[in-house]
Image (spheres, rainbow, N blue to C red):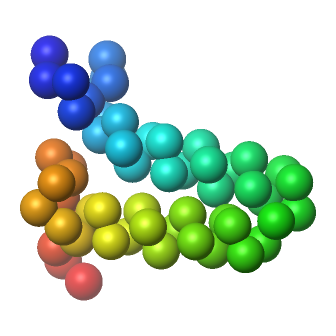
Amino acid sequence: MNQKHDDAGRCRTCAEWKRAEAVANAEYDWSRATDCRVLLRRHQLGAGCPGRRGDR
């Protein structure tokens, strides 16, 4: 299995950003949650994401 994917075939970096956003939201850190969403989107649009989304 590719190291960029978890056992279910999802991108690990995407999962890490989503998890970080959830933690930030739980801590009521809206600025950090927004940063996580922006960085997730940049990652998904870049060439480094195996589940690359270039549709928007």
Residue at (69%, 67%) from the top-left corner? 32
Is 52 on the left or on the right of 30, as rendered?
A: left
Residue at (73%, 75%) from the top-left corner? 31
In the rendered image, which quarter contains the C terminus? bottom left
Residue at (30%, 62%) from the top-left corner? 43
Q: Position of residue 44 (x, y in %)?
A: 28, 63
Q: Position of residue 1 (x, y in %)?
A: 14, 16
**What is the residue that sits farthest to the bottom in this orientation?**
56
Residue at (45%, 41%) from the top-left corner? 15
Q: In this view, does 6 lie above or below 36?
A: above
Is 26 on the left or on the right of 6, as rendered?
A: right
Q: Is residue 44 above or below residue 3?
A: below
Q: Quadrant of residue 13?
A: top left
Q: Position of residue 42 (x, y in %)?
A: 33, 71
Is 40 on the left or on the right of 43, as rendered?
A: right
Q: Where is residue 22 in the image (x, y as percent from the top left)?
A: 69, 50
Q: How many labels does the image show?
A: 0
